[in-house]
Image (cartoon, helix red, strand yellow):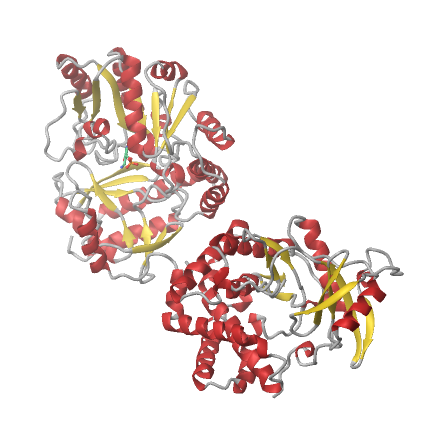
Amino acid sequence: MSVRVDEVLSVAPPSFSEAEAGVIAENLFGVVGSARAARSERDQTFLIDGQRPAVMKVSNTAEDAARLDMEFLAVRRVALVDPSLPVVQPWLVPGALSGVEDPASYRAVVPGVAGSHHVRMYDRLPGRASIHGAELSDDAVRDWGTMAARLGRALRGFSHPSSTRVMLWDAQHALLLRDLLGAVADPAVRALVGRTLDRYEAVVSPVWPTLRAQVIHGDLCADNVLVGDAGEVTGIIDFGDMGFSALIADAVSAVESHVAGRAREDILRTVRIALDGYERATPLELIERTIFGELLAARACASVVVPEFRASMDENRYGRTADLRRDAVKLLEHLDDLGFDVVARRLGGREPGAGSPVRQLLARRQDVLGPALTNPSYDEPLHLVRGEGVWLFDADDRRYLDAYNNVPVVGHGHPRVSEAIARQSRRLNTNMRYLHDTVLEVADRLIATSDPSLDVVLFVNSGSEANDLAWRIAAAATGRTGGLCTAHAYHGISEATAALSPEAWAGRVQPGHVRTWAPPDGYRDSDHGAEPFARAIGQLVEAGHGPAAAILDGVLTSDGIIDLAPGLARELVHLTHEAGGLWIADEVQGGHGRTGAMWSYQRLGIAPDIVTLGKPMGNGHPVAAVITRSDIAERFAQTTDFFSTFGGNPVAMAAALAVLDVIDDERILDGARATGDHLRAGLRALQRGAPVIGDVRGMGLATGVEIVQAGTPTADRPSADRIINELRRRGVLIGTTGAGGNVLKIRPPLVFQPRHADLLVATLAEVLGDGRS
Ligand code: PMP
């Protein structure tokens, strides 16, 4: 049987007696004490019980001095980079001629019957070796996992010419085990190993070159890790399997020991605990989790095959590995029974979400989420599993152009935002009862982009909360109770904001303290200027409610996306102030660059008293804010002590800051203006041959398209519904809005480009052209 593996595995280990070892220790290192042989695979290890407890390692005759030097340089590197890692250090040989920096000064030579042996002496570290996995507490497993990751980090960037070597335990060479398979006596076990290696070849081999790789310890198993009474790792010993391999392989060797002897139901749980520990120091990549099961299985294959191979050569010498082999077979059987796809999913190695059929999800959703929840969009609901920029992907990996979602303002899954969230979440997430600097930076940045009069920021978690808080502030600051909003406005789900949301009144009567006003409908020629607004104020006062505030979404999304004239906007603010109320600019829809200005009120040329932010603020992470003047905040402070558990938390602030940065860096505002104009030009060109398009309007990347009965201004909701469903079938997502439900709502992520606008217009042209609309 010939394999191309390293010679140290096939040459017999040294065979000094304990008495001879004692003499060697004294002669070479001046240590006086009795020597006891300890377990070792290919070398000889002796515990020297002298004045200073030590461990002496006598190498195999095939061991190469350059590799021992690499081990020395590696442990030195670890001690330098992460000094608190308990890595064993070799002794300087007394009287060594070269200096302390020379690796050769840390090894001596002794002649033996088969040739000469290198001898190294180490301090004995505290703790127990060879602990059986089932004895380890969860804390011990976690700590071991963390140590594995820290060791990998400490060895990052370490290189040495001797770091490539073919070792059977190294997962990258797992397929070499096939050459030794004949030594496995039990045919069922042989078949199991064969199957496992086939799976490895199919799944791991193709992705191996993509794995993070570096010089690693190579064997963080129970023989090489010492554990203290509290389960903490007290020593990492024996760097003899060091080599250049996949970084994750150290976690794999550790985990093989952790699961040894455990009940089946405890195996994957233990793996997850170990990986939690690992990720305290080094987050895993998805691919590492995905193939972890196969790598663990490959390692278990080696634990079955290598001992059997050796036993087939010399039964006595390798008899002690029976336990290892038995545990490995059990592990292989368990992984094989579960199936590696299941293992990958249970170890977090699969993208979440994929899998269940749409109909099943729909039924379950109705069952457990109840009837009040809004229906999913479209006749054929979408099961989306992934997003990237302006694209969304369903469970079948079909791609959709997202021209609907305004929340991912800088695009779905923007790496800057996602990574900022993940990083901060790993580091710390607390609340505003503690000092934190990012929240101040976000506040500064928001204030810097705001009207100069606005100088105080309060953080909350959703648009509804922001508007709710704004309402409370306005009520406190004015001492009044009345509210004004547009005829089909939407401002949130709380009691106070639902009262200001006629869109969601759903046939219920108008609350006594609220009056609505109809925004101008330029298309149907019903522009009455500020008159409807002034009338609403009058009605409110008449009803005994002086206005505390008027609230306006600057792009009037729910009213059908209306471009208010700045002159009118200024007049409305003036009338509100005259009546003793405050102006709340709801920027939940129109803010963060949607209109091509940072805040939609800036386009309207007004200075609000209170501004509310939400949806796009964290690109999907829940974060919202209220910006106001300090004099108003002062009056609010006299009525309450404001604290929101999640409001302003460090993770939310990391998201908010990243979004602001990306908006600047990617010149999002310029893009929103240019692409929005391009889109509307395309839609207007289409309108010329499509009498069902009554009006095309909007600003920046908020666009409304009125669908009407051809040639009339009569709203045609059924056609609008058909159009959005047809577009969805053709891979373009938009919605509808407005009191008549007939306005196509086109409100994409702001990274939408002219080519995306062209695709949208072309697809809409197809839909309109096929006669069904
Ligand atoms: N204000 C406006 C203008 C909105 O469009 C919305 C949400 N559609 C809200 C407030 C409420 O935001 P949230 O759903 O985050 O509570």
* Residue 737 seen in the figure: yes
Q: In which quadrant of the rendered image does the N terminus lie?
A: bottom right
Image-quarter location of ligand 1 = top left
Lateral position of residue 322 relative to residue 24, left or right: left
- The picture places residue 617, in percent across and down from the top left corner, at 39, 36
668 with respect to 721 (left or right): right
Say which of 688 and 539 sits in front: 539
Q: How many marks?
A: 0
Q: Is residue 696 left or right of residue 125?
A: left
Decide which of 348, 496 is in the foreground and name it.
348
> Could you say which quadrant of the image residue 643 lies in?
top left
* Vertical arrangement, residue 495 with respect to residue 667, above or below: above
Q: Quadrant of residue 499?
A: top left
Q: Position of residue 220 (x, y in %)?
A: 59, 63
Residue depicted at x 35% and y 25%: 611
Residue sitting at x 25%, y 35%: 557
Against 80, residue 584 (above or below) is above
Residue 516 higher or lower than 342, as above or below: above
